[in-house]
Amino acid sequence: MRYLFRFAAPLAIAVVLVAGVGFLATSNLFADAQRTIFPRTPPDEEENDEGPRLPNGKLQRDAILKDELRKNLEALREIQQLSGELIQELEADTEMVLSIKSLKKLEQLEKLSKQVKNRVRK
């Protein structure tokens, strides 16, 4: 009787392991078969659709990117104009002190550059 338990315990463990592996293998096959019979996406939807479209048929993402590019160009032109004015003010100024007007331009430059940077990072 003692020998029976000595050999039966490892055999029982082996049987449980084989049954578990068999169950996992069949469950994956069952899930694959179920996916082919009942797909998650309806057949009328295109899988290659890139996102929502506007009423004119263009992609919404493309319209957003185009608008952000326009805003970036406007901000960069304003940065260019402000920096040119600031350079002229600093060259014309003989004192070693910045005026309040120059400081406000520097703050506006910083604000615009942060806006452009944040739009580009998205």
Image (spheres, grey):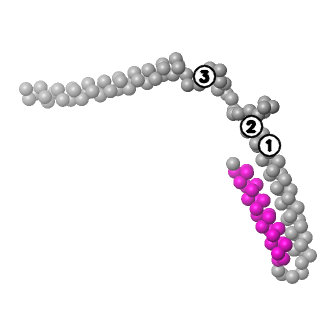
Q: Looking at this rendering, what residue extends furthest in the front direction?
A: 55
> Where 46 falls versus 87 (above or below)?
above
In the drawing, does residue 76 fall left or right of residue 4?
right
Q: Assess whether residue 105 is covered by the magenta stretch.
A: yes
Q: Residues within 10 Å of mark 1 (few under 14, many from 20)?
A: few
Question: Mark 2 is on which residue type?
Answer: Gln
**Mark 1 to mark 3: distance in Å?**
32 Å
Counting residues from the start of the chain, the first of labels 2 and 3 encountered is 3
Residue bearing the label numbered 3 = 42
Q: Secondary structure at mark 3?
A: loop
Q: Quadrant of residue 106?
A: bottom right
Which residue lies under the disc numbered 1? 66
Q: Give the magenta part as a residue range.
A: 98-121
Residue in view at x 13 percent, y 28 percent: 5
Which residue reaches farthest left? 1
Q: Nearer the viewer, residue 108 or 83?
A: 108
- Mark number for residue 16? none
Pointer 2 residue: 60
Relative side of 44 to 29, left or right: right
Among numbered discs 1 and 3, the one appearing first in the sequence: 3
Tell me the CA gap for discs 2 and 3.
23 Å
Amino acid of disc 3? Pro
- Which dot, 1 or 3, sits closer to the camera? 3
Distance of mark 2 from mark 1, alpha carbons?
10 Å
Q: Earlier in the sequence, mark 2 or mark 1?
A: 2
The magenta stretch spans residue 9: no
Residue type at numbered disc 1: Lys
Assign a secondary structure to mark 2: helix
Give the image location of residue 114, x and y in percent.
Answer: 73, 59
